[in-house]
């Protein structure tokens, strides 16, 4: 589909327009102008697909389709275009012929990590790595942060949607051209591009890999590929956020976009979106148009998009936006789409993570239990691998916020215990867990953890220590942990997708130039806690037993282990403002347990007064809390300790 170069020269063009009466390829190819005349008329088959061949077409040529239909006539962009030009202002622009396989990849040795070993880092391309005030950061800017991410210890990068949207700046969830990289994320000026190339090749050289040429990064798709390539070279997988439950509303600055896929075959517009080819009149208030998934061709269009990211961008995973919306609006056809999608993706890339944003409470018309979403299609399930788990997120955020109201406030530690393992799932790794994400802490929504912890002073000891508690629960619980950009260095502001919103951008100076000691401390804490997760395999395993909860003391203790192996770990945590000394809890085995991590140490540049257990304890007390032994331990105020069996 779309425009594809042919080895012997020229390009084929293919588009779907069942009600169109004529479709032409227009543009200038090899000095020959093709307009809406006989030499550019495409042929229509019995299924409504139009095909054509332009022998003079070459990579980089601009083209548009001219479509005559029963309702109107005019230009249309290629729904499968790999990149859009700026020959005219969007949306009246041309598509660009781009080869799909010309980028010189370096990632042959990379293997997508096992799900149990994943730590996801979510970011917004346009605001993550800004180097020019008020101007969106780009794919090439994000490349400069790869060494930082490697040092942090994450191994899955999950950018918010990167495809072309109607209006910039944007979160990315109002997609207009699903196969095109968003224009603000692309560097087009040759001067800066040469500077970026030097940095890119420095990173490749550090791994003894061949450099790229300037031509290799001159297109938007190649710049995105370079970002993925370098992530892979440095051990980081890339999971793309894709939006198949809806598209944008196809208005630019309040005016209809007549060049988009809406009414692509130019049917008569009677005010019913069911006539618009790709879309339906069903809507759940997503802010855009919902895809007509009862049409096989529409389902195939979206499945082709997933295949495009796998084949041309070496995707390691997908976060599928709001599968619950998709099912609620489309019923059986939505379920069919999900099974077709997951089966196709699994066939093309078996190790790829298929992460469904699914909220069972939002699906009233086509109710499905969460377990069916992550069951195989062969067993009657939808075929996704994992789902979002908001239970732990809500419990931790709620507890931290409740603790901020003082010692008399009730703090529900039971809620944390009950959600350490996501209810309704067979495996711990089937849940993606977080305490912050793009939806929760954006401008106009809820607050970052430090604000919840102490709204009066987001740098106070209370804010710092309770934030460590929240991140500690996240990274020691079962599931795939998900960190939102800035969370790892105590960013306390709601985030904005607008690079001009200077009051809501990441404060990189705080850690890179050490202008905020609290951020420096927290970044070190997060880095070493992630390292603990790698060093203690039980923290990445299935088993968890929250064996002790005391709401009055605000204490929770839980046991992690590997079935048949051991590698036992005990975590004891509190949201009390006072340190617990000589606090007795059960231990699964008697003998020596080493204190592997103490959150109190990471305050004030390495806290010499940290309340701890002198490096370890000996469990020699009487049976307690269902275990054969016990010990009196120290739990630092608003903190946690992690013990591993010697």
Image (tube, rainbow, N blue to C red):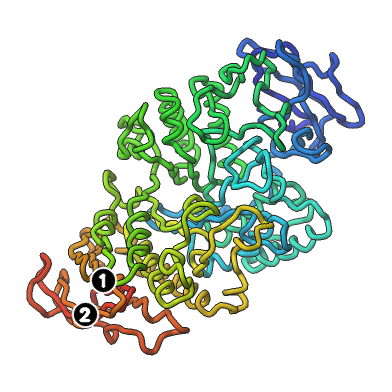
Q: Identify the residue at the far bottom of this view.
A: 608
Residue toward you, 534 or 120: 120
Report if the CB atoms under discs 1 and 2 are less than 8 Å apart. Answer: yes
| Disc 2 element | strand
Judge whether 330 appears above or below 464 on screen. above
Q: Residue sitting at 65 percent across and 40 percent down? A: 165
Label 2 environment density (alpha carbons within 10 Å; few <14, some 14–19, many ≥20): many
Indicate the position of residue 315 as horizontal and vertical percent values. Answer: 55, 46
Indicate the position of residue 65 as horizontal and vertical percent values. Answer: 76, 24
Q: Residue sitting at 50 percent across and 38 percent down? A: 348
| Disc 1 element | strand
Q: Earlier in the sequence, mark 1 or mark 2?
A: 1
Which residue is labeled 2 in the image? 633
Q: Residue sitting at 18 percent across and 63 percent down? A: 547
Q: Residue 509 falls in which quadrant of the image?
A: bottom right
Which residue is labeled 1 in the image? 572
What quarter of the picture does the N terminus occupy?
top right
Indicate the position of residue 138 as horizontal and vertical percent values. Answer: 68, 55
Residue 261 is labelled as: none
Q: Taking 146 as reference, is 87 left or right?
A: right
What quarter of the picture does the C terminus occupy?
bottom left
Q: Taking 387 as reference, is 582 left or right?
A: left
Judge whether 492 appears above or below 139 on screen. below
Indicate the position of residue 6 as horizontal and vertical percent values. Answer: 74, 31
Judge whether 357 appears above or below 236 on screen. above
């Amino acid at each position: 589909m779309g425009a594809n170069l042919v080895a012997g020269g020229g390009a084929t063009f293919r588009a779907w327009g069942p009600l169109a009466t004529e479709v032409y390829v227009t543009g200038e190819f090899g000095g020959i102008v093709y307009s809406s005349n006989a030499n550019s008329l495409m042929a229509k088959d019995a299924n409504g697909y139009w095909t054509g061949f332009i022998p003079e077409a070459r990579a980089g040529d601009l083209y548009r389709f001219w479509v005559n239909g029963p309702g109107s006539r005019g230009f249309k962009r290629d729904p499968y275009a790999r990149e859009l030009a700026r020959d005219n202002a969007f949306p009246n622009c041309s598509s660009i012929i781009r080869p799909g396989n010309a980028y010189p990849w370096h990632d042959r040795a990379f293997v997508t990590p096992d799900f149990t070993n994943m730590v996801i880092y979510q970011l917004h391309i346009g605001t993550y790595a800004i180097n020019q005030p008020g101007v969106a950061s780009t794919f090439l800017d994000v490349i400069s942060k790869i060494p930082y991410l490697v040092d942090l210890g994450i191994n899955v990068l999950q950018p918010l949607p990167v495809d072309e949207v109607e209006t910039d700046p944007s979160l990315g969830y109002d997609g207009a051209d699903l196969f095109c990289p968003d224009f603000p994320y692309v560097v087009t000026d040759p001067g800066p591009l040469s500077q970026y190339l030097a940095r890119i090749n420095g990173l490749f050289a550090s791994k003894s890999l061949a450099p790229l040429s300037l031509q290799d990064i001159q297109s938007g798709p190649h710049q995105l590929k370079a970002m993925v390539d370098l992530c892979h070279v440095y051990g980081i997988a890339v999971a793309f956020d894709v939006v198949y439950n809806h598209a944008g509303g196809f208005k630019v600055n309040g005016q209809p976009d007549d060049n988009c896929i809406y009414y692509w075959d130019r049917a008569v517009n009677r005010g019913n979106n069911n006539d618009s080819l790709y879309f339906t009149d069903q809507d759940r208030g997503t802010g855009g148009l919902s895809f007509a998934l009862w049409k096989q061709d529409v389902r195939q269009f979206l499945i082709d998009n997933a295949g495009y990211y796998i084949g041309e961008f070496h995707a390691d995973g997908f976060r599928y936006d709001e599968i619950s919306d998709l099912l609620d609006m489309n019923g059986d056809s939505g379920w069919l789409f999900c099974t077709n999608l997951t089966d196709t993706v699994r066939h093309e890339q078996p190790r790829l993570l298929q992460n469904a944003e699914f909220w069972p409470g939002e699906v009233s018309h086509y109710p499905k239990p969460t377990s069916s979403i992550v069951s195989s299609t062969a067993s009657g399930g939808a075929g996704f691998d994992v789902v979002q788990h908001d239970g732990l997120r809500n419990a931790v955020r709620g507890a931290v916020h409740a603790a901020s109201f003082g010692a008399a406030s009730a703090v529900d530690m039971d809620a944390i215990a009950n959600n350490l393992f996501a209810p309704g799932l067979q495996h711990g790794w089937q849940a993606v867990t977080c305490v912050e994400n793009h939806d929760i802490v954006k401008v106009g929504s809820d607050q970052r953890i430090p604000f919840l912890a102490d709204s009066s002073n987001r740098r106070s000891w209370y804010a710092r220590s309770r934030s460590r508690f929240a991140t500690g629960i996240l990274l020691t619980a079962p599931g795939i942990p998900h960190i939102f950009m800035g969370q790892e260095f105590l960013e306390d502001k709601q985030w904005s997708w607008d690079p001009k919103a200077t009051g809501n951008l990441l404060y990189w100076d705080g850690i890179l130039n050490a202008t905020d000691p609290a951020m420096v401390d927290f970044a070190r804490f997060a880095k070493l806690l992630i390292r603990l997760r790698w060093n203690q395999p039980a923290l990445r395993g299935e088993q968890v037993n929250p064996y002790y909860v005391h709401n009055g003391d605000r204490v929770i203790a839980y046991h992690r282990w590997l079935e048949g192996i051991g590698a036992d770990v005990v975590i004891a945590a509190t949201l009390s403002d006072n340190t617990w000394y000589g606090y007795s809890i059960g231990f699964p085995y008697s003998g020596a347990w080493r204190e592997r991590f103490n959150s109190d140490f990471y305050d004030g540049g390495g806290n010499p007064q940290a309340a701890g257990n002198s490096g370890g304890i000996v469990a020699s007390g009487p049976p307690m809390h269902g275990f054969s032994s016990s010990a009196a331990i120290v739990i630092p105020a608003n903190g946690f300790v992690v013990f591993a069996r010697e």
